[in-house]
Image (spheres, rainbow, N blue to C red):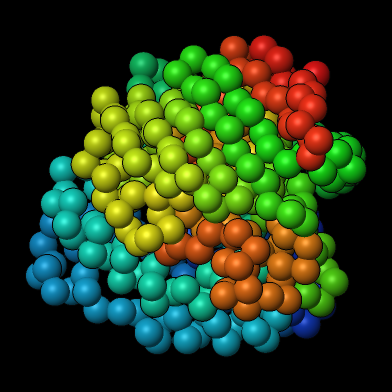
Amino acid sequence: MLSFEQKLQNYALLAVKIGVNIQPGQTLVVNADLAAAELVRLVVRAAYESGAKLVKVNYTDEQVTRLRYDLAPAESFLIPPKWQAQELEELARDNAAFLTIISADPDLLSGINPARIADNQRTHSSTMAGYRELLMGNHASWSGLAFASPSWAAKVFPDAPEDQRVDLLWDAIFSAVRADLEDPVAAWREHQASLTRRCEHLNAKRYSKLHYKGPGTDLTIELPEGHIWCQAGAVNERGTPFMANIPTEEVFTAPLKHGASGTVTSTKPLSYGGNIIDRFTLTLENGKVTRYTAEVGGETLERMLSMDEGAAYFGEVALVPYHSPISQSGILYYTTLFDENASCHIALGAAYAFTLEGGTTLTKDQLIERGMNQSLIHVDFMMGSPEMSIDGITRDGKSEPLFRSGDWV
């Protein structure tokens, strides 16, 4: 049985070898909260040992973030971080890789004036649009993983003794990402091959629509001509493979912007902007959310949907079996990185260019012409359940079962 230190080293190795897949002479940019410093140091070591030219670490502090929202003047949330955007875009064009380590409290901004959060998100997202497009088009390698902070662990395991919460969360993370295995890198390559086979099957089918039925959900989503089913393993423009999410259990593609109709109901809480949205239902006509309700976080949901014109349209559809390892753990993580891998999910906002044939070579206007949604946001919400059924509709109108009782047929 591996020790905690061995598992954490395995985790750092996965981040470097599988996640961003650092190449000799490459720069790595690490974005993390101070709470994750222990893991960051192991990542830095592994990156340099893999030949990295430079590892640049950008730390944040959730307490400082909260203080800003509590005390800073309102106009500070309207100041665009131009210097940060310029640096990140330059690094991305120069073949840097980007690793984000999340650890923040899902309720970090609970009670904050929603206008402050909305102003900051809109200002930051619009300023970072160029950088975000480089990543969403896979022009640079990027990946995300998590660190078990005390505040996050308290949210996930509120009933456990305080001195056991972080250990419980680490055990769950290590299991979900396969860091508790003797050779996690080999295990990940085998797992990726399995997801690739699933994508190949769906890409051969070329379904024109998906039809979802489940509790509170009766939804049809059209798929654009030339859509591509993908998994989190990708290849950047220089031909280097990387893994965008650790963990991952999904296969996904882009919907046709104006092609969704019906009703969809969430099945897990969504943490957005430091607040929780839960038990919400969206009704769509011609691809756009026209009505919505939420038992928790309705004001936050309204703010998200009004971020820009594309925020009320879908940008991703992802298939995840109910009996995936993360789902079977029975743990609600309150972070999309993990919860999206326990449930079929859909994203509001921007579509990934690489989910369309030739998409990474197209301009924004050309992507729009092909039916790909554009937005400042890309927010996944979970809507899968053990009662979910999904049919693929062929171009000649034939219906074929994909999911029954929440799992692949």
Q: Nearer the viewer, residue 379 or 29?
A: 379
Q: Position of residue 118 (x, y in %)?
A: 25, 58
Q: Position of residue 252 (x, y in %)?
A: 69, 44
At x 71% / y 71%, what residue is drawn?
Answer: 360
**Does the rendering let one see residue 28?**
no
Q: Is residue 26 left or right of residue 81?
A: right
Q: Is residue 116 above or below residue 363?
A: above
Report the label total.
0
Q: Position of residue 153 (x, y in %)?
A: 42, 33
Q: Is residue 178 left or right of residue 71?
A: right
At x 21% / y 70%, what residue is drawn?
Answer: 77
At x 40% / y 54%, what residue is drawn?
Answer: 311
**Does the rendering let one see residue 258?**
yes
Q: Quadrant of the C terminus?
A: top right
Q: Nearer the viewer, residue 224 or 254?
A: 224
Quarter of the figure with residue 295: top left
